[in-house]
Image: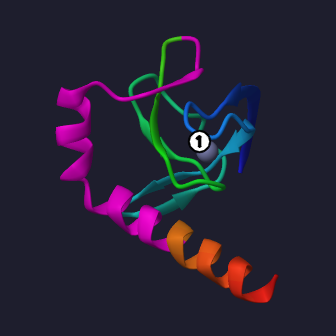
Amino acid sequence: MKHIKPSPCPNCGVALDGATAVDEDGIDYAAKPQPGNPTVCILCNHISVWDKQLRLRNPTPAEMREISKNKVVRQVVAGVALVRAMRKAIN
Ligand SMILES: [Zn+2]
């Protein structure tokens, strides 16, 4: 995970201070998010986009259409949903 300046999730408001880059080749723990990259909140599973100042914002409808085609993002969303379900079952 790459530590970043904390930015609130547009959905749940938690200050996210780290990001891990994932693509079809795997995970790059050292990569810093780039403006326009989609990201998934590890707490609420909301999909956001990094802006030019690396703060999180909601995707535009056009961005959301593109993100919805991204297989890696869909896999990350499924993974976060699984972790959330497991946490709920434990607590
Ligand atoms: Zn969130």
Nearest to the observer: residue 58 or residue 3: 58
The image position of residue 35, as x and y in percent, is 45, 22
Quadrant location, the C terminus:
bottom right
Q: Quadrant of ligand 1?
A: top right
Percent across and percent down for residue 46 are: 49, 47
- Identify which amino acid the numbered label 1 is placed on: Ala
* CB of mark 1 near ligand 1 (< 8 Å): no
Decide: few, some or many residues near mark 1? Use Cα within 10 Å; few <14, some 14-19, many ≥20: some
Q: Secondary structure at mark 1?
A: loop
Using residue 40 as the reference point, say whether residue 74 is left or right of it.
Answer: left
Which region shows up in magenta?
Answer: 53-79
Q: Is residue 58 above or below residue 11?
A: above
Percent from the top left, x then y, of residue 87? 72, 78
Q: Which residue occupies the foreground of this view, 40 or 71?
A: 40
Circle 1 sits on which residue?
Answer: 31
Task: Please determine whether, in this image, residue 16 is positioned above or below residue 45.
Answer: above
| Above or below, 74 relative to 48 | below
Q: Main secondary structure of the magenta part?
A: helix
The image quarter in which residue 55 lies: top right
Residue 32 position in % (x across, y down): 60, 35
